[in-house]
Image: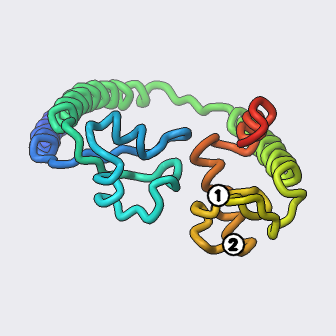
């Protein structure tokens, strides 16, 4: 009975998903490292101005990794197709999981198994060590770039480039405070390179980041 109810619920969810996909008038994309508004506009058959207006962007040159942008391209049919396919896959997966759950419940009556606690502890330790190493490397790369660009001075100027990280004045939007320089520098590097270490590698290859 539980399996039958799961199948009926899944079918209803599939129909709802298909209806939502069919009536969607706009698509949403998630910004990835290295993306620009111009590239996103080109891929979605729209314009930079249209994306700027749809998302109320103050500066089209400043977008962030993970940011959701609405685009009004000609990809409604593709969105509907993708949604329908995903809904079908969800239905198949749910059916399979329901069957497996039933079999697992029967098997648990005759056999019990506990995973070794040391596995989780070891994985957690390795993850913490890796994160510490990555953060330390990024901090060193950030300091290295700041020294190369301005000698670490928030008041350094070079034409249109301002401050500790020599950011374009348009990026800073008129706010040259240390706090804003740090905030915009983090956003710029995260969006364009993904990390300060990657930005340093680019600087070493090209003489700028």
> Considering the image in quadrants, where does the C terminus appear?
top right
Name which residue lies at 15% across and 48% down: 25
Name which residue lies at 28% across and 27% down: 93
* Disc 2 packing (10 Å; few <14; some 14–19; many ≥20): some
Q: Is residue 1 visible?
A: no
Whole-percent x, y for residue 175 in the image = 63, 74
Q: Nearer the viewer, residue 3 or 70?
A: 70
Q: Nearer the viewer, residue 116 or 65?
A: 65
Q: CA distance from mark 1 to mark 2?
A: 11 Å
* Disc 1 packing (10 Å; few <14; some 14–19; many ≥20): some
Q: Are marks 1 and 2 in contact (CB under 8 Å)?
A: no
- The quadrant holding residue 100 is top left
Label at residue 168? 1
Q: Is residue 71 above or below residue 90?
A: below
Describe residue 1's horizontal placement relative to residue 121 as left or right. Answer: left
Q: Nearer the viewer, residue 55 or 154?
A: 154
Whole-percent x, y for residue 78 in the image = 20, 31
Q: Is residue 89 visible?
A: yes
- The quadrant holding residue 56 is bottom left
Describe residue 94's horizontal placement relative to residue 125 as left or right. Answer: left
Describe residue 116's horizontal placement relative to residue 51 as left or right. Answer: right
**Of the residues under marks 1 and 2, which one precedes in the sequence?**
1
Name which residue lies at 33% across and 31% down: 101
Q: Is residue 104 above or below residue 67?
A: above
For label 2, the residue is 176
Name which residue lies at 21% across and 28% down: 85
The structure's colour scheme is rainbow
Asked which secondary structure carries label 1, the reply is strand
């Amino acid at each position: 009975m539980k399996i039958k109810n799961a199948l009926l619920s899944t079918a209803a969810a599939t129909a709802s998903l298909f209806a939502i996909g069919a009536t969607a008038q706009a698509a949403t994309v998630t910004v990835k490292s290295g993306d620009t508004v111009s590239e996103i506009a080109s891929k979605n058959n729209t314009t930079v101005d249209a994306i700027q207006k749809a998302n109320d962007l103050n500066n089209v040159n400043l977008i962030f990794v993970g940011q959701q942008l609405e685009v009004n391209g000609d990809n409604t049919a593709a969105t509907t197709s993708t949604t329908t396919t995903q809904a079908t896959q969800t239905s198949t997966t749910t059916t399979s999981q329901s069957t497996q759950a039933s079999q697992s419940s029967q098997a648990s009556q005759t056999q019990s198994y506990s995973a070794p606690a040391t596995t989780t502890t070891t994985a957690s330790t390795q993850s913490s060590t890796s994160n510490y190493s990555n953060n330390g490397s990024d901090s060193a790369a950030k300091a290295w770039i700041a020294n190369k660009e301005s000698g670490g001075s928030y008041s350094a100027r070079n034409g249109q480039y301002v401050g500790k990280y020599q950011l374009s004045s348009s990026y800073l939007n008129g706010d040259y405070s240390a706090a804003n320089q740090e905030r915009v520098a983090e956003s710029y590097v995260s969006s364009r390179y993904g990390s300060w270490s990657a930005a340093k590698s680019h600087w070493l290859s090209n003489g700028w980041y």
